[in-house]
Image: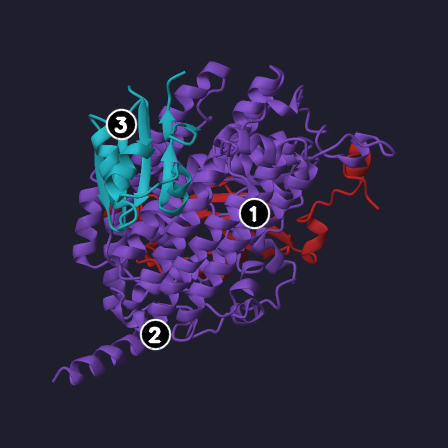
Chain colours: A red, B purple, C cyan
Amino acid sequence: MLNALDTAEYLDHVTVRDARKNFHGNILVYVHWEDHLSFCAAIAFPLPPTLSFGALVSDVIAPAYAAHPDAARIDWSKVEWQIDGVRMVPDLSLSLEANGLGHKSLLRFKTPGLHGWKGSAN
Amino acid sequence: MTPKKLGLKQRYALMTRGLDWETTYQPMDKVFPYDRFEGIKIKDWSAWEDPFRLTMDAYWKFQGEKERKLYAVLDAFAQNNGQTGISDARYTNVLKLFLTGVSPLEYQAHRGFAFAGRHLRGVGPRVAAQMQSLDELRHVQTQIHTISHYNKYFDGLSEFRHMHDRVWYLSVPKSFFDDARTAGPFEYMIAIGFAFEYVLTNLLFVPFMSGAAYNGDMSTVTFGFSAQSDESRHMTLGIEVIKFLLEQDADNLPIVQRWVDKWFWRGHRVLGLVAMMMDYMLPKKVMSWKEAWEIYFTEAGGSLFTDLARYGLKVPKYADVATADAEHISHQNWATFYQYTHAAAFHTWMPDRAHMDWLSEKYPNTFDKYYRPRFEMWAEMEKQGQRFYNNSLPQLCQVCQIPMVYTEPGDPTKIAFRCSQVEGETYHFCSDGCKDIFDAEPQKYVQAWMPVQQIFQGNCGGASIPDVLAWYRLNAGADNMDYVGSPDEKLWNDWHAAAARAAG
Amino acid sequence: MAQIASITLLHNDDARPIIEAILADNPGCRVLNMPGAVKLDRDDELVVRRASVEARIGRAWDPQELQLVIVSMAGNLDEDDDHFTLSWKH
């Protein structure tokens, strides 16, 4: 029986429940659209790391946010991206991994000129 | 000469002291293996004082009397079809959230105090913890019993126990108590006895139960206030435990301070569910969450922490952030459930104009500026047949497990993102409060059962929303979605149409 | 800022004479009425006296009977056979 009062024995039994190996080949990616808080939080997606960034935008991100009135007006070529706090310009033809997205990375984007319902960040 | 009746203080001393003994054939440390490892030093267990001086015989007498009063009300409520006299069927959604989210915590508290009552070495706190353990069992029983009457008529209640262990938002209260119960007995006593019972529980039971009374739910207000009458004793236990630990040894202060900081913040996050009940779900409102926070935290907590300052204990870290959050938390939470209504076991709705005006009046600094536009946008979309849903799963905070919806202190237009790295893995948090808790004990929280991640790992019945709802035993089309159009609404309208016909 | 000693009682027939006794014995006591309950606040100290309650109900009363009507409280408690006192004084 595990003796949880023995620190070494306890640490030996700690399992990282959300390790990458538990996601069946996918990585977990979080996406957040700035100034559009009617989507209450960043969105979580399990994605193949080999997926191209272009496919992420067209097949994953765009449909997820389609319900917002601003969504149809996004000019994806003008979008500003940030991965884990660092500004970057993605190469749409390269994979998520090649663009610097890792397991549980946070991808935030801004849409210049679009700041939510009547500019209220909603 | 008749013997003089003993005074309360003497009776208490006789009935609680000398009940224990020093072990002989096993060392005391083996009999009480858990009361040292947390680092708390106790020099004199007999210094423990229970100011209520309640002895077991008096306990049974008073509890029996409380039960008789409660069950008389429950019988009367059932016999008189009290469910038809509530303010509106929307009200029952607070009962759904309460039964699925809070009542199972009463059971957890029962188990936790039984553990503390077994494993604390001093007889005073053991007696008090055992009484509280019995109280908590009474609470869960009376709550299930009371709300079972509503289960005969309304959806969303029947699978409360199954849901508590599975549904995404119920992992918030569940993990809160799991965290407390997997701590040592002293941390548990500070977490639940002090931070929750003394500092925060009034916010749950007083204005909210008063709200039940105001909305015509005679049965819930009765169990609520019956439970709360025990709570006064629990609060006393909570304040005694903290004074006792701080008086026993100066080395206890930093440990206790860290627990107070942690459990204040965790409790504040959990109570966001109550904030939403008060501001959005009670058809007739007693007071706003912000007003309740001012009375029960700013004012009552202020008096308490002024008192505890003589031991060097400080106001919980981030209390100022929590107070600023009181302007936002109910709106942010209700917006979350509105967009995830398809995955919630209770009904949602957009506040109507009168309700929004009430919110403007109660939240002059924030509602019109940040939240009214969101709700007007959604109401507009609803009118056009484009009711707004969020069909993706949200990022969750690794500690409180709430979707990361909370905003930066000082900027309600920016989501707060915090993260830490441990052994090459990234963990995300909604706030500095939750990040601090993780950083102090990462090995505990890397093991957290995060509902969204579990769905993606394939552990929740399947990959589609219907698969997951089936695994939750959520009866889609009845338990979830908007109140308007629900079977609950139809039932309520039928009752009222029948009453109108009968009245001619 | 003064520290507030406080007691919240059910608003029913059992509690009414206790509420009256508190108001009589604690000058400056403030009253917050809520549906179903009443919160009584006073700076620093609030006392419930057995004799005052007994004078109103005409029978012997044990301060521990407060257990049946109390909803919440704030302050350090001192209770014996004659009184139930909530106080921040030391």
Q: Is residue C74 left or right of residue B422?
A: left
The numbered mark at residue B109 is: 1
The structure residue drawn at horizontal position 59% and vertical position 40%, both measured from the top left corner, is: B129
Asked if badges 3 and 2 are on one and the same chain, I answer no
The numbered mark at residue C42 is: 3
The spot of residue B61 in percent (x, y) is 49, 50
Q: Is residue B90 visible?
A: yes
Indicate the amino acid at tag 1.
Ala
Q: Secondary structure at mark 1?
A: helix
The structure residue drawn at horizontal position 25% and vertical position 58%, both measured from the top left corner, is: B351
Q: Is residue C46 left or right of residue B204?
A: left
Q: Secondary structure at mark 3?
A: strand
Quarter-of-image position of residue B459 = bottom right
Indicate the amino acid at tag 3.
Arg
- Judging by the rendered image, the residue that carries numbered circle 2 is B79
Real-space Cα distance between discs 1 and 2? 32 Å
The spot of residue B45 in percent (x, y) is 65, 25
Q: Nearer the viewer, residue C12 or B100?
A: C12
